Image (spheres, rainbow, N blue to C red):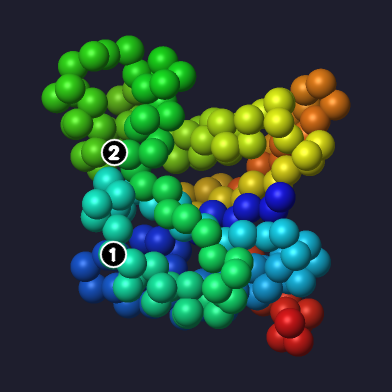
Amino acid sequence: MNEIFIDIENTLIDDLSSMKLLDENIKRISSLCHIEIWNRNNTRINLFTWGWKEHSEIKQYVVDWLFDALDIPPEHRGVVWTKDDSINCAFEHKWINTKDEVAIEDLHIPGAMRRWGLEKQTCFIQQCMDKASFPNNMQNFDTFMLIDDTNPRWFENRTFFKNGTVLNVIFHNPAEMEIREEAKGS
């Protein structure tokens, strides 16, 4: 399975308040998504944001609008991971060593995850490992990609091997992505 996760704030739009599309990023990301869908039919496009703290904050009309802006066909549209998903992952893996509900709730505050040494990319890798049940229950090779303005400004690929299975995690910064010509025909 090929799973692409796209950050919302400062990647697709400026922020969740004014919701101004970042047109150049939209073009770059759409181009890459269409090439991935064209090359691997089992590609799903998802959203991954810490702008929405909990699933109850997700606005489906915004999700649909963003997928429409990217021109993602409905059969390739996936899920939305929120900050809560990352917090729950960190708690399950004992990266957060507190039972204090107030301290856990405080992790929703922007920048608070750094207090525990956690960044979006670290949580993303573990969430992908959990989703893929790495290294068990995999179809030998799964690829997960995060497109986010907080990623390094260079292409980064991390590959994890265990018991003959491979988990590939790719980080793209939209500012460094190109609009590929092949995507125009797809």
- Which residue does the image show at 62% across and 59% down from the upper left? 44
Left or right: where 138 falls relative to 59: right
Q: Quadrant of the C terminus?
A: bottom right
Whether residue 149 is visible, yes or no, is no
Amino acid on which the number 1 mark rests in the picture: Lys
Q: Nearer the viewer, mark 2 or mark 1?
A: 1
Toward the viewer: 2 or 32?
A: 2
48 is higher (above) or lower (below) than 179: above
Say which mark, if any, is on residue 59: 1
Q: Position of residue 110 (x, y in %)?
A: 25, 42
Q: Position of residue 174 (x, y in %)?
A: 55, 63
34 is higher (above) or lower (below) than 11: below
Mark 1 closeness class: few <14, some 14–19, many ≥20 residues within 10 Å: few
Q: Are marks 2 and 1 in contact (CB under 8 Å)?
A: no
Q: Quadrant of residue 7?
A: bottom left
User: Which residue lies under the disc numbered 2?
Assistant: 111
Toward the viewer: 84 or 51?
A: 84
Whether residue 49 is visible, yes or no, is yes
- Which residue does the image show at 71% across and 26% down from the upper left? 135
CA gap, disc 2 to disc 1?
A: 23 Å
Say which mark, if any, is on residue 26: none
- Which residue does the image show at 35% across and 32% down from the upper left? 87
Amino acid on which the number 2 mark rests in the picture: Gly
Hey, which residue is sitting farthest bottom in the picture?
A: 185
Left or right: where 177 falls relative to 97: right
Toward the viewer: 75 or 116?
A: 75
Secondary structure of the residue carrying tag 2 is: loop
- Which residue does the image show at 80% across and 66% down from the upper left? 39
Secondary structure of the residue carrying tag 1 is: loop
User: In the rendered structure, which disc, 2 or 1, sits on the residue that comes first in sequence?
Assistant: 1
